[in-house]
Amino acid sequence: MIPDFLVTHSGGFHADELLSSVILTRLFPQARLVRSRAPEWIAPGADRIIYDVGGAYDAEARIFDHHQRGAPLREDGQPYSSFGLVWKHYGRDYLAALAIPEAHIEAIHASFDAGFVLPIDLTDNGAISPAIAGPLAGLTLPALLETLKPVFDETAPDADDRAFHNALAIARSFVEAKIAGSAAKLRAESIVQKAIRETGEGRVLELPMGMPFRPAIVKAGADHLLFVVHPREKDWCVTGIRRAEDGFELRADLPAAWAGLSNQELEKVSGVEGASFCHNGRFIAAAKTREAALAMAELAVKEALGSN
């Protein structure tokens, strides 16, 4: 049954019910969002979904709280917040509502749960401290969303609700952007995998546009690839491939002699007409034409293999 009401608690807000509201208001846009602790509102009913309040977790009754004794835990024993519970039961429908291809829903549901939902769950339950982020602790998503609460002397009766709805719009943008990025990576994966097959044993991977490429290269086990070439709006790019997801070490650097050079200086040193730029860090270069970009990449390959 489609709910008429989405019910969460009134007063100060936190990331978990804000993010739960992102999911539920997208799925049930006609439902009225009610923020209340009144018993008549937080009691289960056929016309509502209740979350982060109510003292129970019962998916059939559509109540999703986690503050009670015997609160729900994940299979690995980690705690849920209301966001985790709502994502568990409604996340797949939410992804479908965002027009995510059916073949990608399970993968994105799992990755978003692990990388976005779980940290919110753990923080809300005190299972991890924001302090682990060190000097960035105040810039974590839960901390930033809480800065949108009314200040202490903003005493208008509707201050909390106005702040909640303003924060809801911001929270929505983060969720949708994260999911859009995950969906884009999966779309890119098929393009990169096709290019890898066409490249064979070559060391330079040519792509039709800029896109996330490293995950697909790693998944394909294409350890022989050293550089990627692709067009940009007005030129072509030559870029290295990072060895690991974290860190900046590359499988191969661009030639040291090119570092920091551009245009005629770079053309002279590289011997490639149309070479236009090489970053001083030697991880990315640019060329005016496809032919120049491929020529630069092949020279970089020869130098890298010659130094091994």
Image (tube, rainbow, N blue to C red):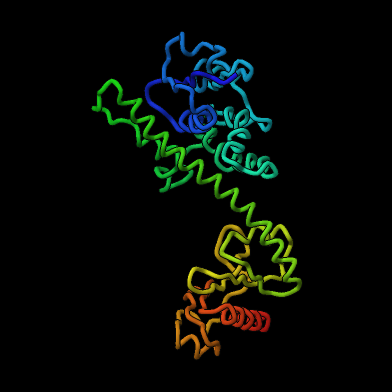
Q: Residue at x 27, y 28 (%)?
A: 152
Which of the two residues, 18 or 144, is positioned nearer the viewer here?
18
Q: Residue 162 sits in which quadrant?
A: top left
Q: Disc count in the image?
A: 0
Provide residue 290's location: percent of width, then percent of height.
Answer: 58, 77
Q: Position of 300 compared to 42: left or right?
A: right
Q: Residue 73 sits in which quadrant?
A: top right
Q: Position of 224 compared to 236: left or right?
A: right
Which residue is most to the top?
Answer: 40
Q: Residue at x 45, y 41 (%)?
A: 141
Q: Residue at x 69, y 60 (%)?
A: 218
Which of the two residues, 239 or 130, is positioned nearer the viewer here?
239
Look at the picture and state if 279 lies above or below 103: below
Could you tell me which quadrant the C terminus lies in?
A: bottom right
Which of the two residues, 84 or 78, is positioned nearer the viewer here?
84
Could you tell me which quadrant the N terminus lies in?
A: top right
Q: Residue at x 68, y 70 (%)?
A: 225
Look at the picture and state if 198 lies above or below 151: below
Provide residue 183's location: percent of width, then percent of height.
Answer: 60, 48
Provide residue 200's location: percent of width, then percent of height.
Answer: 76, 71
Q: Residue 146 sits in which quadrant?
A: top left
Provide residue 65's location: percent of width, then percent of height.
Answer: 54, 21
Which of the two residues, 191 or 260, is positioned nearer the viewer here?
191
